[in-house]
Amino acid sequence: MSDLKVGVVGAGFIGPAHIEGLRRHGIEILGICDITPERAQERASALHLKAYESFDKMIADPRINVVHITTPNYLHYQQAKAALLAGKHVVCEKPLATNTKESAELVALAKEKNLVGTVNFNIRFYPLSQQARAMVQAKDLGDIYIVQGSYLQDWLLFPTDWNWRLEPELGGEMRAVADIGSHWLDLVTFITGLKVKSVFADFQTFLPIRKKPTTPLDTFGSKLETPIEYIEQPIHTEDYATVLLHFDNGARGVLTVSQISAGRKNRLYYEIDGSKSALAWNSERPNELWVGHRERPNEQLLKDPSLLAPQARQYASYPGGHNEGFPDTFKQLFLSVYRYIEAGDYTAKPDFATFEDGHEELVLGEAILQSFKENRWIDI
């Protein structure tokens, strides 16, 4: 679909998801790089790609137009900045940076260079996420009163579960909120069009000591293995958080996040309650949207392009009964991003999350962390 050419930095769990989504559009990936040349070569061979010796050599390739950043959090700012300075558009995993000073700089730099900066909030691109947004915009729900839900996982339930996200110097001061809570917050604000005005947060670390393996483990792989050798490591980031939310229209909300909820593999859930009706959605059943009513039977909308609003229909590639899931969100997000880049009018409002959205999520995250530390409401 495009003459644009791509380089991908980071080939762990999420890098191959980017690569698959790009390949489904026929977008050419010139190569990948990783933490070491050896690791890059190993991953590149598995993915049938070229390995760049380093990130610097990758962004120096004049053929590359777009850089996808799928590395640990602490690298996002420096790699996004370097890519922008090299004249490349950027698709960056969240968080955009580790603090708002860095993210604000990236927002300004992308504008100065007239380049597109995207944050990979891919959950917007489930067809029923788009349908929910269309229904809110059409006032099918009436005035929004309550926005509530959770994002629950179990991949860090045991003391032997380990990942780089547990280390603040790699992942940042927050873990569950930054890693999965940011997805929930971006999604519900995208659907409702509301802004969070103030927050009150409660955190808990239930496993203050974990067993860190002496050899690296892939994300989501640690629960399948029992490392023979480990060291005991104190944990300073949250396993759990609940955040009370006040929105700019007077609506109220609550979010709970956890990475230690047994049996919840990757369950983002929201319910939006309005003055006319309500919506609810569960990411582990992404092709079903519950619609609640007071005066008539409730509905269960199954993903079917012929039943969706026009603005949602374009993100459903298959007929009703042909389910679409997590990999399809990358395909749809990248279709939107690359069409936008090709169109060339960067003053137009995109439907994907921009660097500005990534910065706003960091502003919100810093307020949530401050609220927990000071045990009080924090205005955004």
Image: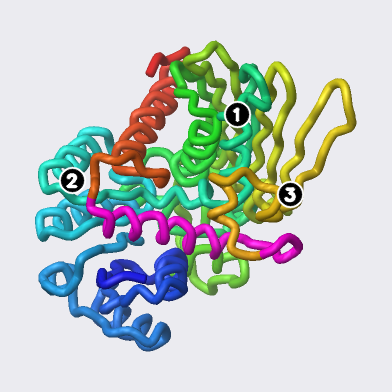
Kindly state the secondary structure of the residue where label 1 is placed.
loop
What is the C-alpha distance between the residues marked 2 and 3? 37 Å
Q: As shown in the figure, which amino acid type bears the numbered disc 2?
A: Ala
| Residue at the spot of label 2 | 110
Q: Earlier in the sequence, mark 2 or mark 3?
A: 2
Residue 170 % position (x, y): 33, 52
> Camera-side residue: 171 or 303?
303
Q: Which residue is mark 3?
A: 288
Query: Marks 2 and 1, Cα distance to the nearest angstrom?
Result: 33 Å
Depth check: give the residue in front, 338 or 371. Answer: 338
- Image colouring: rainbow
Q: Residues within 10 Å of mark 3 (few under 14, many from 20)?
A: some
Determine the image quadrant of residue 38: bottom left
Q: Confirm whether residue 35 shows in the render.
A: no
Q: Residue at x 26, y 33 (%)?
A: 100
Please tell me which residue is depicted at 60% across the width and 22% down the height of the picture: 253
- Mark 2 or 1, nearer chain start: 2
The residue at the point 20 percent across, 43 percent down is 106
Residue 239: % across, % down: 55, 42
Magenta span of residues: 319-344
Tell me the residue at 38%/87% (across/down).
48
- The number of callouts visible is 3
Queried whether the magenta region covers residue 365, the answer comes back as no
Note whether 340 is above or below 276 in the view shown.
below
- Residue type for callout 1: Ala
Give neighbour class at mark 1: few <14, some 14-19, many 20+ (Cα, 10 Å): few
Q: CA distance from mark 3 to mark 1?
A: 20 Å
Residue under numbered circle 1: 138
User: Which amino acid, by three-letter code, is at mark 3?
Assistant: Glu
x and y percentages locating residue 327 in the rendered image: 54, 65
